[in-house]
Amino acid sequence: MARVGIRDVAKAADVSVTTVSHALSETHQSRVNPETRRHIREVAARLGYAPNRLASGLRNQRSHLLGLISDFATSPFAGEMILGAQDAAFERGWVLMLLDSGGNPALEERQVSTLRQHQVDGIIYAKMYHQYVQVADKIRGLPAVLLDAVDAMGTFSSVVPDEAGAARVAVKELTDAGHRRIGFINNAHDIPATAARLQGFREGLEAAGIEFDAGLVTYEDPAPDGGRNGAQRLLARTERPTALFCFRDPQAFGAYEAVRALGLSVPEDISIVSIDNFEIIAEGLWPKLTSVALPHYDMGRWAVTRLLDEIEDPERVGPPVQIRYECPIIRRGSVAPPRHTRLN
Amino acid sequence: MARVGIRDVAKAADVSVTTVSHALSETHQSRVNPETRRHIREVAARLGYAPNRLASGLRNQRSHLLGLISDFATSPFAGEMILGAQDAAFERGWVLMLLDSGGNPALEERQVSTLRQHQVDGIIYAKMYHQYVQVADKIRGLPAVLLDAVDAMGTFSSVVPDEAGAARVAVKELTDAGHRRIGFINNAHDIPATAARLQGFREGLEAAGIEFDAGLVTYEDPAPDGGRNGAQRLLARTERPTALFCFRDPQAFGAYEAVRALGLSVPEDISIVSIDNFEIIAEGLWPKLTSVALPHYDMGRWAVTRLLDEIEDPERVGPPVQIRYECPIIRRGSVAPPRHTRLN
DNA sequence: TGTAACATGCAAAACGTTTTGGAGGAGGAG
DNA sequence: CTCCTCCTCCAAAACGTTTTGCATGTTACA
């Protein structure tokens, strides 16, 4: 069961290892007679030879390894991002080494150093939600791309969702249906998405010629309880909104319950749109929730693609770029025209 | 910015590379004078030297790489398993290479071969839910452990949740509260968990001296709609159950809605217990859902720990073992005594 | 026929470690 | 004083590739 090496192939094909290497290489094919090349390749295939990447990595100073260091432990979207990254990497012959720091900076340092020891060709630095980060000093000197985060220094390329755009899309869905009094359950935490989505919310209203009313936005915990509270508060207003826009699906989850508790129903009395497209919630709720998807898979892909471009052809790629990825809306059953419109 | 190698350390400390290697090694410390050793370590630390793992892997035939090959793409529990595996690996100086086949066998073959090229020391073969598998032939010859799957041939060690135990725990929670007429919304798909949980359900009833009634179990799609249907069906019986045990949290999600649609409420009229402890659902539902947790993190840890034991000390570990991991119940607000009991 | 150009193959060095087998010197025992 | 042992260190080989430079043989052309 000993692994078969290039020497075994050479011996079996009765040529030197040099020739085998050349025959199997794309770029050096020309140095070997087409006939011998064919023969060698056949023998190699028969023996099931595949080059040892440790050895070739050592020789070439190219490990074909990418480090992905994350802080999101078990966050629900982690899988999407990682899968996107993994797919893009594998397609181009690379593989991902996964390390999760859970946000612990000391641990993160050790992990980066481990990655360096393994001679990774580059690093994807991934965060669980869109944020600004000061990239660990340890990373400097290695190609890196930020995923769902932007580099405060602008040294690295990065990709994040277009938060404002997502909010605009959500609001448009509501205004297109005829709603003019829309409540916004925003996030109580001050992260970039909070401001950006508020911005998008305002822009969405403006586009529909609706005046912004600060009384219609409330800041809540980004959890079901927050959604419940926010919805209760907003729906208690004398001028009751006919639609709710939630910062995040779990809040929408809570909002549904608040609506029901008031004896109202979605979407007949209250339309709801949210952001996340968290399938387990959006498909589980009744009626199913219309939600704007955060393109985690695509962002993961983009990050790796960009990173590999930077690695393989540093000249050609140009300076770091900061990408914002468009967010598509997934329509389900939580939006309808407001009652008074229907009564027209 | 050139990487610092062992030669740089040797030069700086004015000794040979051999001596540096010995000084830094645990096992060969004795071959170098304590005084020089101290000095060398100091110099190494100052230079920030860390050995190149490609090189040492090549020399030692030990890459300190583990392959984790999965089929679960973006399944919600993937994160937990992977994190557990990653933690256990990192603690012992290993790192995980992640590859997801999405269940495609041809792709899986190529991935295993890629892992082999990278000289992984072992493989974790992970599935998204407890199942029997025929391990790909390509893996033979490499140490491997199955995660959330059991090897049909019994060649490899494996770890899965104790499905029957989980069901017993869930039922006990209900019978302890005084319920005697318990409906079971089982899974319509024939996977090991379906039979095992039914088995556990029966055992749980028996332990409480309750006779099993096949009319109280229904087989539904393991999704919210399935839960909704199942609950409707069960609650329509003339002898209405006072409690529902669901195969899976998403079904419980649907069951809640069915209960509400009948004008009943959880837990006053109907108690509900489920399996998954899917936080996003369990914490989002109102009242919060009592659910039996599947110990994904721990299973991930166990798998890697076992795998490393097999790798590091093949003599000592003995034959493959098939582990079933205990599942703890997480109590929230969906269980109460049945009405008639309270009226006593 | 002599020579240049090309085609085909190989030997050897290098990538950065770890480990084996000494070498040289100091100290102790006889 | 001699011999042995132990202590400390080092040179060299090996892990499995890739690539450079060279050697040989062949063809083409003058």
Image (spheres, coloured by chain):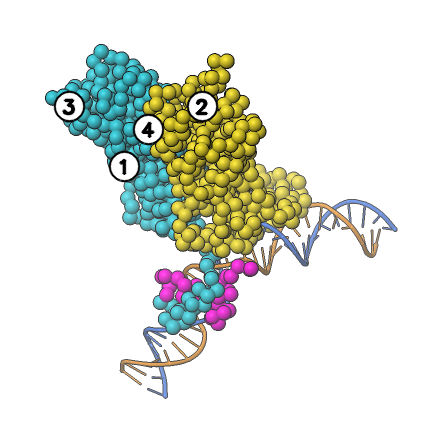
Chain colours: A yellow, B cyan, C orange, D blue
* Numbered disc 4: secondary structure: loop
Q: Is the Cβ of the residue at disc 3 closer than 8 Å to that at disc 2?
A: no
Q: Is the Cβ of the residue at disc 1 closer than 8 Å to that at disc 2?
A: no
Which range of residues does the magenta coloring cover?
B1-29
Q: CA distance from mark 2 to mark 4?
A: 24 Å
Q: Are marks 1 and 2 on the same chain?
A: no
First reached walking from the N terminus: tag 1 or tag 4 = 4
Location of residue A72 in the rendering, given as x and y in whole percent from the top left corner: 42, 42
Residue at numbered disc 3: B342
Residue at numbered disc 2: A242
Label number found at residue B325: 1
Query: Does residue B5 show up?
Result: yes
Dot 4 crowding, Cα within 10 Å, few <14, some 14–19, many 20+: many
In this view, the residue in front, A317 or B7, is A317
Location of residue A23 in the rendering, given as x and y in whole percent from the top left corner: 61, 44
Q: Amino acid at mark 2?
A: Thr
Location of residue A27 in the rendering, given as x and y in whole percent from the top left corner: 64, 45
Which of discs 3 and 2 lies nearer the camera? The answer is 2
Q: Is the Cβ of the residue at disc 3 closer than 8 Å to that at disc 4?
A: no
Q: Residue furthest left?
A: B344
Dot 1 crowding, Cα within 10 Å, few <14, some 14–19, many 20+: many
Residue at numbered disc 4: B285
Q: Are marks 3 and 1 on the same chain?
A: yes
